[in-house]
Amino acid sequence: MQLGSLTLKNPVCVASCPWHLDGSGYEQLGAIFTRTVTMEPKPGRYEEGIWQVADQTLLNATNMRTENAEILVSEYLPNLLRYGVPVLVSITAPGIPGFRKIARFLKREVGHLIAGVEVYIAAFDSAKGADITPRFVREATEAVRNELGEDAAVVVKLPPWPEHIRGLALGAQEGGASALAATNIMKGLHLPDDATAGPVIGGLSGEALRPVALRCVYELAHDERITLPIFGTGGVFAASHVIDYLRVGASAVQIASGEWLEPGVSARLAAECANFQPETTLWRN
């Protein structure tokens, strides 16, 4: 996969990567995408905020902690860089100034070490879905691109909205994105077995997300206006799932829930799928 001036050697990447990634085989990955960080930390819970709500399906609770970029740079990044594959830092912010600030910080501190960033576009719980518009995506992407420069890879991860994702993608493309990722988590709710416990709200990932993410990739890949390569992300647990994303138009995949449920699965799939080529599996009309 060509990511700007960067060529990924493998279509399998890990996303929302564990801070302390251990084991072998990860050097075969196409890229490592970090957990999403903000400029200021958001207090909350760690892994206990992730609920397995069905087979191979997770709900990431809204009250999970978000680390800040400074902690990533000082404590976690060296562990991820040691595998010798491109590392992209996933970032989010509630507005354009926030995206600009965190991109500027990363450029100053580790711009020579990372391959680029992932711009994570999501409607915060205090916001409305209507707040995420093509204009917002374009301006967020443009702000990050201007801070990082032309050589950095800028991947824009979009919400799982098949009806609107083409317009959002065009905004990212106009803002200078290198690639798109479809998709991030889908808002959901889980009711614990304890009838006295309140509902857990958060974002669904894994198996339940895959059909929606596949549709989103399909929508992007079959729009002649969109020329950017696409990462498919959502429910990748087997080589057949990688093939599914390539068939509908993705050039690579990201694995997040699979790595959380089965540590090492992304390294295993990278070995299995090293020779997969999107052009040999793409389904066309």
Image (tube, rainbow, N blue to C red):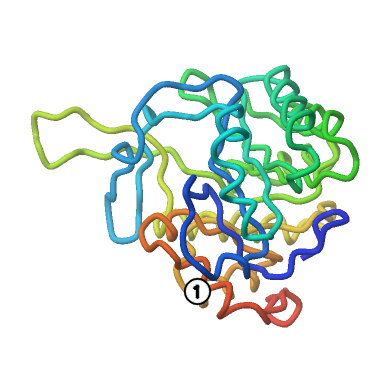
Q: Name the side, left or right, on which 281 lies relative to 226.
A: left
Residue 202 placed where, x, y %?
Answer: 38, 35
Residue 188 placed where, x, y %?
Answer: 37, 39
Q: Which amino acid, mark 1? A: Arg
Q: Nearer the viewer, residue 148 or 57?
A: 148
Q: Residue at x 57, y 78 (%)?
A: 271
Residue 61 placed where, x, y %?
Answer: 35, 35
Picture quadrant where residue 221 is located: bottom right
Q: In the structure shown, which secondary structural element does the residue marked by tag 1 occupy? A: helix
Question: In the rendered view of the protein, which quadrant contains the C terminus?
Answer: bottom right
Vertical side of 141 occupied by 282: above or below? below
Q: Residue at x 74, y 61 (%)?
A: 222
Picture quadrant where residue 136 is located: top right
Residue bearing mark 1: 268
Q: Residue at x 28, y 50 (%)?
A: 52
Question: In the rendered view of the protein, which quadrant contains the N terminus?
Answer: bottom right
Vertical side of 172 occupied by 1: above or below? below
